[in-house]
């Protein structure tokens, strides 16, 4: 997982950036807002701590992470102990920072999930009493899988359609008790 800081303290953000390098800022929860009558969400944003308004930062907690170099991203949909992986390749600058920012620039491919990643995802689900989780990873240029987050109610149908992976069938098997491990 990338080095992470949650704070309202501007000095802490500057010190954190000095220690870990380039930063991104993420929302702590799903945030939808309206701009000119259109619903918008807040995407992962590259930030320069030197230009952050300390007064605005102090209003609420912000999540900062070290920016991880990426080759591509992976969404692993865990259904029970079954891992269904899809590589998400970004074709624009906006999508490289946060793939949700430019769906039209994405391409998808099924991907095998390393066994150690599957094992850790199963442990995560077990610890939280979950049977499903949408895990997001960055794969670095060195092929290291870096865990970003698990969405316990993450979207998945578009991945099934784009990459041809059987998430619906896996969910049906889980719900009917026909899961094979």
Image (spheres, rainbow, N blue to C red):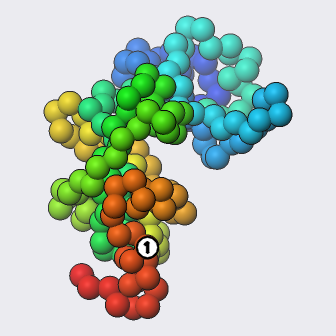
Indicate the quadrant containing the C terminus: top left, top right, bottom left or bottom right.
bottom left
Spot occupied by residue 104 in the image (x, y as percentages of width and height): 48, 36
Tell me if residue 138 comes above or below residue 122 in the rendering.
above
State the image quarter where residue 58 is shown: top right
Which residue lies most toward the bottom here? Answer: 177
Dot 1: within a 10 Å radius of its alpha carbon, few (fewer than 14), some, or many (20 or more) residues?
A: few
Spot occupied by residue 19 in the image (x, y as percentages of width and height): 37, 19
Indicate the quadrant containing the N terminus: top left, top right, bottom left or bottom right.
top left
State the image quarter where residue 56 is shown: top right
Question: Image check: 39 left or right of 133?
Answer: right
Q: Which residue is drawn at 53% across and 26% down?
A: 45
Closer-to-camera residue (64/113): 113
Tell me if residue 147 comes above or below residue 119 in the rendering.
above
Count up the numbered dots: 1
Spot occupied by residue 76 in the image (x, y as percentages of width and height): 35, 57
Q: Can residue 134 be seen in this view?
A: no
- Residue annotated with mark 1: 168
Q: Is mark 1 on a helix, strand or loop?
A: helix
Spot occupied by residue 169 in the image (x, y as percentages of width and height): 39, 77
Q: Which residue is drawn at 62% across and 23% down?
A: 9
Which residue lies most toward the top here? Answer: 50
Q: Is residue 136 visible?
A: yes
Q: Which residue is drawn at 65% across and 28% down?
A: 8
Question: Image check: 7 left or right of 124?
Answer: right
Tell me if residue 7 comes above or below residue 14 in the rendering.
below
Q: Which residue is drawn at 27% across and 39% down?
A: 139
């Amino acid at each position: 997982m990338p080095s992470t800081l949650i704070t309202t303290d501007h000095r802490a953000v500057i010190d954190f950036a000095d220690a870990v390098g380039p930063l991104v800022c993420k929302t702590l929860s799903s945030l939808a807002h309206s701009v000119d009558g259109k619903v918008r969400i807040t995407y992962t944003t590259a930030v320069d701590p030197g230009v952050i308004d300390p007064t605005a930062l102090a209003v609420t907690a912000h999540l900062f992470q070290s920016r991880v170099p990426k080759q591509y991203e992976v969404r692993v949909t865990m259904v029970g102990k079954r891992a269904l992986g899809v590589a998400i390749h970004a074709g624009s600058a906006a999508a490289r920072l946060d793939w949700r920012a430019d769906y039209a620039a994405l391409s998808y491919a099924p991907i095998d999930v390393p066994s150690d990643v599957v094992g850790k995802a199963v442990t995560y689900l077990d610890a939280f009493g979950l049977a499903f989780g949408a895990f997001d990873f960055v794969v670095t240029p060195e092929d290291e899988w870096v865990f970003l987050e698990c969405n316990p109610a993450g979207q998945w149908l578009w991945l099934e359609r784009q990459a041809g992976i059987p998430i619906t069938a896996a969910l049906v098997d889980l719900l009917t008790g026909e899961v094979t491990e």
